[in-house]
Image: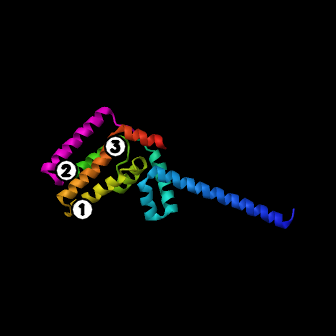
Amino acid sequence: MTQNQVIAIIVAVLAVVAAVVFYLKTQRSRRLRDRFGPEYDRAVSEAGSIRAESRLEKLERRVNKYNIRALEPSARDRYVQEWRQVQARFVDDPNNAVGAADRLLGEVMAARGYPVADFEQQADDLSVNHPLVIEHYRAGHTIAVRHAQGHATTEELRQALIHYRALFDELVDERTRAAVATRY
């Protein structure tokens, strides 16, 4: 075998390895984009694709260790009734209704098996199984923080409640949860 033939073989092997690595990277990105939806784009814009993908995979592994469970029918019914009361309270007391909605979301998350830690961890954890509504949770929380600082209007509080409702509906709706779980 000549030196040129050896070099040609090495170059061919390196090209195949590079193609395989590129293919695997593309598949990883596609899987994470499909899994996290808009949350993938948000993470990439904040940290760049390599760091974001690594972070999302780590997050996915962490959440997969949780004992996420369906709500018992009686608990689901109780939470739905409590949500209706929060919404009804908004008419007379919008300032406290948003806080009550936030607390109720925390209770539902805990009942489902999500650790109730700081907001950022909650949002990150929820993004694994509820990627299409997590931006609603973030938007509602942003308004609630602005309200705590005295900078939110009644209309903004109404919007916060609507945002929170999107996550609440998904957390108590087992059909949505089952559809998300079977996708991956």
> Residue placed at 42% from the left, 40% from the top?
179
Indicate which disc, 2 or 1, sits on the residue closer to the N terminus: 2
- Quickly name the residue at label 2: 97
Three-letter residue code for mark 3 = Leu
Residue 34 on image: x %, y %: 48, 50
Judging from the image, what secondary structure is the residue with disc 3 in?
Answer: helix
- The kind of secondary structure the magenta stretch mainly shows is helix
Mark 3 crowdedness (10 Å alpha carbons): few <14, some 14-19, many ≥20: many
Residue 89 on image: x %, y %: 16, 47
Mark 1 crowdedness (10 Å alpha carbons): few <14, some 14-19, many ≥20: some
- Quickly name the residue at label 1: 146
Q: In which quarter of the image is residue 21?
A: bottom right
Q: In which quarter of the image is residue 110?
A: top left
Three-letter residue code for mark 2 = Ala
- Quickly name the residue at label 3: 171
User: Does 33 sit left or right of 152 as displayed?
Assistant: right
Residue 36 on image: x %, y %: 44, 52
In the rendered view, would you say 106 is above or below 13?
above
Relative depth, front residue between 165 and 115: 165
User: Does 1 sit left or right of 168 as displayed?
Assistant: right
Indicate which disc, 3 or 1, sits on the residue closer to the N terminus: 1
Three-letter residue code for mark 1 = Arg
Q: Real-space Cα distance between discs 2 and 1?
A: 15 Å
Question: What's the magenta region?
Answer: 69-96
